[in-house]
Each structure stands twice: as structure tokens, then as C-alpha cells.
Image (cartoon, grey):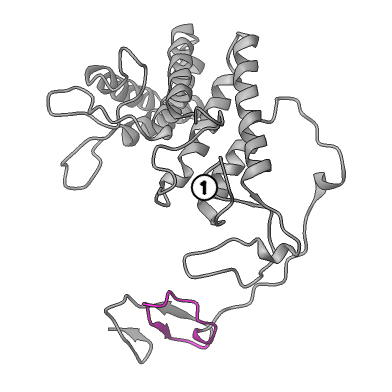
Amino acid sequence: MWFDYDFRQKVSITNLECIVVAGKLFRATKNVKYLIHMKKIWNWVIENEIIDNTTYLVHDGALDNCTGNNFFGPTYLGGTLIGGLVEFYKIYKKESYLDLANKIAQAEIRNSTNIFTGTLTEWCEPNCNDDEKMFKGIFVRNLRYLMDVLKDPKQRQEYQEYLDLNIQANLLYNMCDKVPIHECNITFKDGPPFYNVSGPLFSPNWNGPFTVGAPMQQTAALDLFIAAIKPGTNCTGEYCNFSPNYPKPQPLTCKDYPCPKDQPCCQYTSTSYTCCTSDQKCLSGICT
């Protein structure tokens, strides 16, 4: 699979995602075309040495000479490939797929764990972009998929303890749970939410301290919490049925200043608006 419409490069994540999707589609439909596609991409991974033969880290892409590009930073690379190998195992029941997935998981944990805190840490922190803030969540989600099919209870427990450690790090050092709670709110691109009551929240770096809460890092933290839930767990207590009462949606208008400061707000009906680009002006409800 090409990374862009200009057919200039092939990167690992585009193809690794397709292995996962093709595997799930084949298991759901039994349509062999998905299995053929899955195998074809797996051959590309092998032929281009996307998995480092020494470290078992996953290269970010391939060079023109059909070798890996030696960039091993993003945690979602190993995570997504683990998910793909789990799909292969569910189809073929071959332990070799789990063996390889296990080696990749251990390599990623070694490579991306803060040596002082023991916490999973993205290569770009503290300066990750919005995409990169979700990568750790993708890794731990796929680690859970691996844990659910591993036969070795000792290895499962080792991964469970790693997930639990990361949860404790978030709860102790990276959580905003202030009183009053409105000081902890999701921060969107164009400012705080209209309904300014939320929390607890988590920021991108699981080592802490809390800096800012935005949707991207909440998805990663949620992936972590869900990944650590052991199969067969039952929820007990007052929060198991927690369903807070949210006010009815209230449409915003340009009077609420919903757009970024450098983007003019353009109202085109009494309840509808759009944000123009910084080099545009709003004329009669149209960005020009």
C-alpha cells in the first residue's frame, strides 16, 4: 500500500494497519480475497526487512534498496504489527506468530520505557504532535490482544504488571482531578468546551506532571485503562453505572467566538457558521 496519492513512498504503518483490517475481515466474512491481501502485505514486510533481525524493533518504512529505514521511534509501529500477528495466529493457529509478536512487544517495551520511571514514553515527548499523542494507546491496546491469546501465564502476568504500573503512574503523576472540577476540562483546538465540567483528565506524557487535557491524549489513557482490564472482570460499586447528566446541546454562533483567533467566524444561517482560513474574509456568509 502506498502512503500517498503521489505514489512516492511506502511506509510501515499504512501496510501494518491493512494486515490487521484484512485479518479481521477474513475472519468475519471468510472471503479469501482478504487473506490474499493480508499475505501479500506480509510478504512486503519480510522482503523489506521491516522487522529488525537483531532488535525486533519495527522500521518506520522501507528504503529503495528494500531494507528498513532505521527509524524505530513510534510505539504504534510495534503495536500495530503485534495486532497483525495476532490476526495471523487466530487464522492459522501457528505459535510462531505469537513468538514473533512476543519478541516485538518486549523489544518495544525495552526501547520505549523511561529507565527512571518504568513508564511507557513516546519518542517525541514532550513535543509530540496530535497524531503522536495517541500512539501509546495503540501499542497497549494491541498488547492486550496479544495477552489474551498467550499460553504462558508468566508472560501474561509480566505484561499485566507493566500495564498496571503505567496506570499507577497516570493516577499519581499525570491526572488532573482538582476541586472545583471545572479547572480540569478537555481543551479543544478552539478553546475549552461550552459545558465546562469534566475530569479527571490526563495529559500526553504518562510520566507527568499534568499539563493540558485534549481529546487525543484522553483516547490513549482510555486505551491503557481498558487494556489492563483482565478477562472475566466484573464491575462492582457506585460508579459502574455512572451516567452523568449533561445539558442539552446548545448551538454556538459567532457571538460565542468559536473559531481560532486567526480564523474569521462566518455565520451563514441563524444557527450555523464556519471558520474561514486566516487569509479569507467572510462576505455575506461565504468565506472568500
Identified at 76% across, 61% down, the residue is: 179
Q: Is residue 207 visible?
A: yes
Question: As drawn, is 178 to the left or to the right of 105?
Answer: right
- The stretch in magenta equals 254-270
Q: Position of residue 86 (x, y in %)?
A: 49, 20
Quarter holding residue 252:
bottom right
Give the amino acid type for the residue marked by disc 1 in the picture: Pro
Q: Is 76 rendered above or below residue 26?
A: below
Q: Is residue 26 visible?
A: no
Identified at 52% across, 64% down, the residue is: 188
- Whether residue 117 appears in magenta in the rendering, the answer is no
Determine the secondary structure under disc 1. Answer: loop
Question: As drawn, is 281 to the left or to the right of 175?
Answer: left
User: Furthest residue to the left?
Assistant: 65
Identified at 57% across, 69% down, the residue is: 192
Image quadrant holding the C terminus, namely: bottom left
Q: Position of residue 162 (x, y in %)?
A: 60, 25
Main secondary-structure element of the magenta-colored stretch: loop
Q: Position of residue 59 (x, y in %)?
A: 30, 27
Crowd class of label 1 (few under 14; some 14 to 19; many from 20; radius 10 Å): many
